[in-house]
Each structure stands twice: as C-alpha cells, then as structure tokens.
Image (cartoon, rainbow, N blue to C red):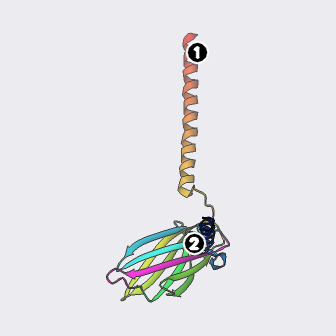
Amino acid sequence: MIRALLFLLASIISFDALAHHILGRPSYSLGDDSNTPPSMQVETQIGDFYVTYMVFPAFPQPGKQGRVNLYATRRDSGKTYDGQVTFTIRDDKWFGSHQEALGTQNIDDGVYRQGFLVKKAGKYLIQARFHSNGEPYTIDFPLRIGQVSSIGPIGIAAIVIFSVLLIVNIIQRKRLLRGKIQSAGRESN
C-alpha cells in the first residue's frame, strides 16, 4: 500500500515537470514582437486576391522600429502571389502629398515583410502596390504612431465656430435685456 502511494506521488511530480516543458514556451525562442498581437489585422478582397495585412508591434511608437506583414492569395486557386510588393508611407492629411518609399519586397515564406521607422507621432497611410497579369493592385491602410490628438482640423474649426456663435448670442441677449430694462425705466417715469 505504501509502495502504491509512493509510486502515485512520484508519477504526479514527474508529470508536472514534463507538462511544464511541453506546455511552456522557452524565452530564448521569442523575438522582439513574437508574443505581442498586431496593432491591426485586416482581411480584404481586392480584384482577384484575398489580402491580409498586419502591423507590429501592437502600439507603434515614434522613433522605434515597426513592421508590416502582407499576405496575398488568389481567390480562384488559393495560390500565394509570388511577385514583388512595393511599400510607401505618407501622412494621412487632406493635403499631405509627400510620399516616402519604404522598399520593395520579395515573398519570404508566404509573407511580404516591410520594416518602417517613423520619427513623429501622427496618423499615416501605408500603401502596398503590386502587379498581376498586367493589372495594378493598390492597398492603402491606416497606421497610427504614438499618441495622436483626437481633435483634428475639422474639430478645431467646429469648436471655433461654435465659440464665436456662443459669444455673439450672449452679446445679443445682453443688448436685448439692456433695451428692455431701459424701456421699462422710461415707462415708469
């Protein structure tokens, strides 16, 4: 009976040790962003392709390296696109026309990977372009770097207009009230 209890106790202890090694992931196999989710993952259809793109790390910061992963497969056959993809970046502003080339990438294990480094916080658009069977394909996707003010130029203009209207309304009410008081004073005399 004692042997059976000792055997059961020893097997439980050894099972815990083995389970730790099976279920755990050793830290030396982790990369800089392998254990963080992407900040964005979008799946879309464009022409003859299904496209998925992801942005790493989860919260891109100014002055720190980031990466875009792009997957493109044909809708009809499911085959991965095997050409080159060109990546560019620009400010996401109404009149922001300055575009900067990030690079042209070949496929690497079914993925197009493009690194980026943005120095200023803000909202940007990354564009991926490729050609297949003589047709151009362009995918634009937004990228937010760092903390960005939630009030843009339209919000600021709306606040200014609202403030001017409020001030004019207050001034008009004071004039109207002053006129009523003066006319009531004249009537009582």
Which residue is the site of mark 1?
185
Give the residue at the far top of this rendering. 189
Which residue is the site of mark 2?
23
Label ID, residue 27 = none
Callout 2 crowding tier (Cα within 10 Å): few <14, some 14–19, many ≥20: few
Q: Which residue is drawn at 49% across and 78% down?
A: 70
Q: Nearer the viewer, residue 176 or 169?
A: 169
Give the x, y percent position of residue 100. 57, 79
**Relative vertical location of residue 151 with respect to residue 14 in this rendering, above or below:** above
Left or right: residue 24 versus residue 72 is right
Q: Which of 89 and 95 is in front in this view?
A: 89
**Relative vertical location of residue 9 with respect to residue 161 in this rendering, above or below:** below
Q: Which of 128 and 24 is in front in this view?
A: 24
User: Circle 2 sits in a helix, a strand or a loop, which is it?
Assistant: helix
For the record, the magenta segment spans 62-79
Q: How many marks?
A: 2
**Relative vertical location of residue 109 with respect to residue 175 in this rendering, above or below:** below
Give the amino acid at mark 2. Leu
Q: Residue at x 57, y 20 (%)?
A: 181
Left or right: residue 66 versus residue 131 is right
Give the x, y percent position of residue 182. 58, 20
Left or right: residue 174 versus residue 71 is right
Give the x, y percent position of residue 90. 55, 73
Q: Nearer the viewer, residue 168 or 118?
A: 118
Q: In which quarter of the image is residue 9?
A: bottom right
How far apart are the two marked residues, 2 and 1, measured between alpha carbons? 89 Å
Q: In which quarter of the image is residue 72?
A: bottom left
